Image (cartoon, rainbow, N blue to C red):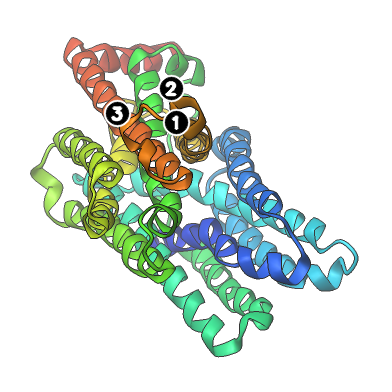
Amino acid sequence: MYKSTIRACYLGNFVGALVSNLSPLLFIILMDQYGLSFEQVGRLTLINFFTQIVTDLAFSKPVDTYGVRPFISSAHLLATLGFVLFAFAPVLFPNQPYLGFMIATVVFSCGGGLLELLLSAIIQAIPSEAKATAMSLLHSFYAWGFIVVVLGTSAMLAIFGRANWPIIVLLWSILPFMNFFNFLRVPLAPQVSEAQRTSTSILSRSPFFITVVLGIALGGAAEVSMSQWTSAYVEAALSLPKEVGDLIGLCMFAAFLGTGRALYGKFGKHIDVWKVMFWGSLLAAGCYVVAALSPWPLLSVAACSLCGLGTALLWPGSVVNAAKRFPLAGASLFALLAAGGDTGAAVGPWLLGFIADTAPAVLGTGFPLASLDSAETGLRCGMLFATLYPLSMMVCLLTMRRLSHRGEATDTVESSVLNTR
């Protein structure tokens, strides 16, 4: 009954990858054509993440009140409109094209935030005995979308030329517009009724839920730090061609990310997601250490790529753990989780860059990596620092297991149901 719904959700997560990753692929072109600075294009990424966080938190209550369909449909329209505005920004704002880029980024990021909030909630509401595998498959389409966006945009730039980048953005805008019509008609499983819904105040007082939110932030930091910094790290620190970083390091990272999620989605029905997350965190920590300290560049590239496998279940697994313990929470649970993940995805890479900027001056000449040039020293130190993300995730997972054995989460769910009646 819900096969068409699941397919539309998978395509929706593909659109989510498009929202998060299309404009960064055009940053150098925008800088060359419109005289933008690194800070200005970097600010577009910050606007993207911040807008998604605000959207996650602002729309959880309206979704619970008015239902999912109007908002999931609007998400795709906003993504479409944002891309169209981005493509026509130089025409609509001839004297200030950057203003147009910022407005367009806010619009399509609102769509991305709604997608992040609602797609997991839609999948979770569908009756199934294998919600963890379904959630993993859903999130695998973000990784496949990321790969297709990178390769597709690169191919279209080669075909149409860098000067015709607006055509590429307009072509990509067709995808969310098509999925808009899908969500107008696919069946949606009923959400939790207001009389039974676990309140946000109950969630915020639960040590288990707080630990899950912290964990998804760390998982987001571990995943996105590697995905955002692999290209620069391979080029600046390992002195390999940019193509190696983009097409081998970055795309292989996304391929491992998607493969890990797809494999769990296919074979993970009887496998404890907690164990996969714990050992995945350990693998990710090892990959960060090898990437930072290996004297062999190709081994470092391999570690950057393999980190995708380690981080594959950290975000979707956190959603599964929370939804399993709080099945009556409604959209507020997914909003808080999405905001937590986005916060980690924004802060984690920024901290890595901050360490890379400051480490050479702070450490001086006595540090083992100080014999390298400052860029390589800084980026290797940043990678080494980022090892803390998956290691801290392991601590969160151990805490969650302890709280779960104590029955804290189950008790909270039962008491919340009683309190709402």
Which dot, 1 or 3, sits closer to the camera?
Answer: 3
Say which residue appears at 53% left-offset and 55% top-offset.
20
- Residue at which label 1 appears: 333
- Residue at which label 2 appears: 198
Give the image location of residue 231, x and y in percent: 42, 58
Along the line of sight, which residue is nearer the eye, 60 or 291?
Answer: 291
Earlier-in-chain disc, 3 versus 2 = 2
Say which residue appears at 60% left-offset and 50% top-offset.
45
- Type of the residue with mark 3: Met
Could you classify mark 3 by the number of other residues whose Cα lies within 10 Å: few (under 14), some (14-19), or many (20 or more)?
many
Along the line of sight, which residue is nearer the eye, 34 or 272?
Answer: 34
Q: Which image quadrant for residue 241? A: bottom left
Say which residue appears at 49% left-offset and 57% top-offset.
16
- Residue at which label 3 appears: 393
Alpha carbon of mark 1 to alpha carbon of mark 2: how far?
9 Å
Give the image location of residue 397, x and y in percent: 24, 25
Q: Give yes or no for contact between labels 1 and 2 (Cβ–Cβ under 8 Å).
A: yes
Give the image location of residue 255, x and y in percent: 28, 62
- Type of the residue with mark 2: Thr
